[in-house]
Amino acid sequence: QVQLVESGGGLVQAGGSLRLSCAASGSISSLSALGWYRQAPGKQGELVASIISGGSADYADSVKGRFTISRDNAKNTVDLQMNGLSPEDTGVYYCNGKLVVPLTGITHNYWGQGTQVTVSS
């Protein structure tokens, strides 16, 4: 069982930066992928960025070039550096970890409690 706790959200003006951090209670090295999702008011949840165990990252088109995801297996953390923030980035950001059970394909999802990011215009 892995527990995830996010931190680093807050209020920032448009054009500013924030760094979100997700700390895992257990080892993240066994997790197949880690990611950040956001839930904006009135909108469907969106996968913002993800990173697999090998280090390859993927981003939503809306954040490419502005956000950077990174993971530190030694510290059991996954961070999201967000630059050039706009009001459209406002939402609750959730850390997600996926564990794929070998030979079964069964996927376990772990979620943090979420952290609020508000970008003012």
Image (cartoon, rainbow, N blue to C red):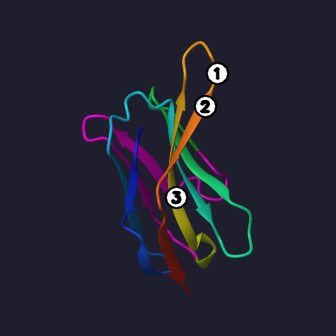
- Say the numbered circle drawn on residue 94: 3
Q: Position of residue 59 (x, y in %)?
A: 59, 47
**Within the image, what quadrant is residue 19 found in?**
bottom left
Whole-number angstrom distance, CA of label 2 to CA of label 3:
18 Å
Kindly give the residue lying farthest to the bottom in the view shown.
121
What kind of residue is marked 1? Answer: Gly
Residue at (41% x, 70% y) in the render? 9
- Say the numbered circle drawn on residue 105: 1
Q: Secondary structure at mark 2?
A: strand
Q: Position of residue 91 (x, y in %)?
A: 58, 71
Whole-number angstrom distance, CA of label 1 to CA of label 2:
6 Å
Earlier along the polypeptide chain: callout 2 or callout 3?
3
Q: Which contiguous range is marked in magenta?
A: 59-86
What kind of residue is marked 2? Answer: Thr
Residue at (41% x, 27% y) in the render? 30
What kind of residue is marked 3? Answer: Tyr
Kindly give the residue lying farthest to the left in the view shown.
74
- Asked if the residue under mark 2 is in contact with the one under mark 1, i.e. CB atoms within 8 Å, the reply is yes
Instruction: Provide the residue designation for mark 2.
Output: 107
